[in-house]
Image (spheres, grey):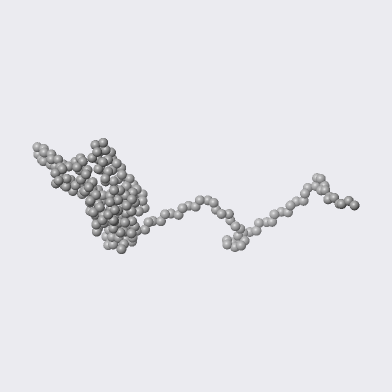
């Protein structure tokens, strides 16, 4: 008894057509079970804007023009007093003309006198009760620890003065570095101004190095505490 063989499909007859796919169901409202799952987004997200750095009520970070003018006033005071001290100690050079007699201080003596006096001047006033130099007081600027407003420690004041770059003037006593020392000091002042101007907290490199910040009242006529208690 032979077993039945499967019937072969007739040649030339097309295979039966596949059924049409089911029509897409309309998507339900967002959050419903009928809502189709969306593929995860792979595009870059726009970063959120940086929020402003807070400061104590009634205070703002000291602006660059006021700080620059204050520094020029302080440097002038240091120059005048330093020259007087050098002359009093007998380091001046007397110049006599047909109509007048004067004493000049220049060269290495002036560079050393200015540097040492500037160190004492800035550190003394920054760590004092007013926490501001004479030039800074004109604009109601105060220097404090960033950002709790505590008075500067001696180490912070010394670090901020070093960050000023005033010590670069001492290299002027070396004959081979006289002009380069003055140029380097001027270039460093420009760097400090640029970094402070681009900082949202108006901190130059010297402020970041010493962890200090400068503030002033938001309204010159308003009576506000110098720093929060």
Q: Is residue 144 above or below residue 164?
A: below
| Residue 219 in sight from this viewpoint | no
Q: Residue furthest top?
A: 176
- Viewer can see residue 200: yes
- Residue 17 x/y as whole percent: 75, 51
Q: Position of residue 224 (x, y in %)?
A: 29, 62
Q: In the figure, 30 relative to 98: above or below?
A: below
Instruction: Quarter of the image for the C terminus: give it.
Output: bottom left
Is 55 above or below relative to 84?
Answer: below
Horizontal and vertical percent position of residue 188: 31, 44
Left-right relation of 109 to 22:
left
Q: Which one is in front, 153 or 102? A: 153
Which of the 4 image quadrants contains residue 113?
A: top left
Q: Camera-side residue: 171 or 40?
A: 171
Query: Residue 180: image x %, image y %?
Result: 28, 38
Residue at 33 percent across and 61 percent down: it is 57
Q: Residue at x 68, y 56 (%)?
A: 23
- Seen as rendered, the residue at the extreme left is 98
194 vs 37: above or below: above
Q: Is residue 76 left or right of residue 204?
A: left
Residue at image position (36%, 53%) is 200
Which residue is located at x 23 percent, y 40 percent?
Answer: 173
């Amino acid at each position: 008894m032979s077993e039945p063989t499967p019937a072969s499909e007739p040649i030339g007859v097309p295979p039966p057509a596949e059924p049409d796919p089911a029509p897409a169901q309309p998507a339900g409202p967002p959050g419903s079970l009928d809502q189709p799952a969306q593929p995860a987004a792979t595009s870059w997200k726009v970063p959120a804007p940086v929020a402003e750095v807070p400061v104590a009520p009634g205070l703002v970070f000291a602006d660059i023009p006021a700080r620059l003018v204050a520094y020029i006033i302080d440097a002038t005071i240091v120059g005048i007093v330093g020259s007087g001290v050098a002359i009093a100690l007998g380091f001046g050079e007397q110049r006599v003309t047909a109509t007048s007699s004067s004493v000049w201080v220049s060269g290495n003596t002036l560079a050393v006198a200015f540097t040492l006096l500037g160190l004492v001047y800035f550190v003394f006033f920054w760590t004092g009760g007013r926490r501001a130099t004479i030039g800074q007081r004109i604009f109601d600027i105060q220097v404090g620890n960033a950002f709790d407003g505590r008075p500067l420690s001696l180490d912070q004041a010394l670090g901020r003065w070093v960050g000023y770059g005033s010590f670069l003037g001492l290299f002027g006593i070396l004959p081979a570095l006289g002009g380069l020392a003055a140029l380097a000091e001027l270039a460093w002042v420009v760097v400090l101004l640029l970094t402070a101007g681009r900082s949202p907290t108006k901190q130059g490199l010297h402020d970041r190095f010493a962890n200090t910040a400068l503030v002033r009242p938001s309204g010159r006529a308003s009576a506000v505490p110098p720093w929060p208690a």
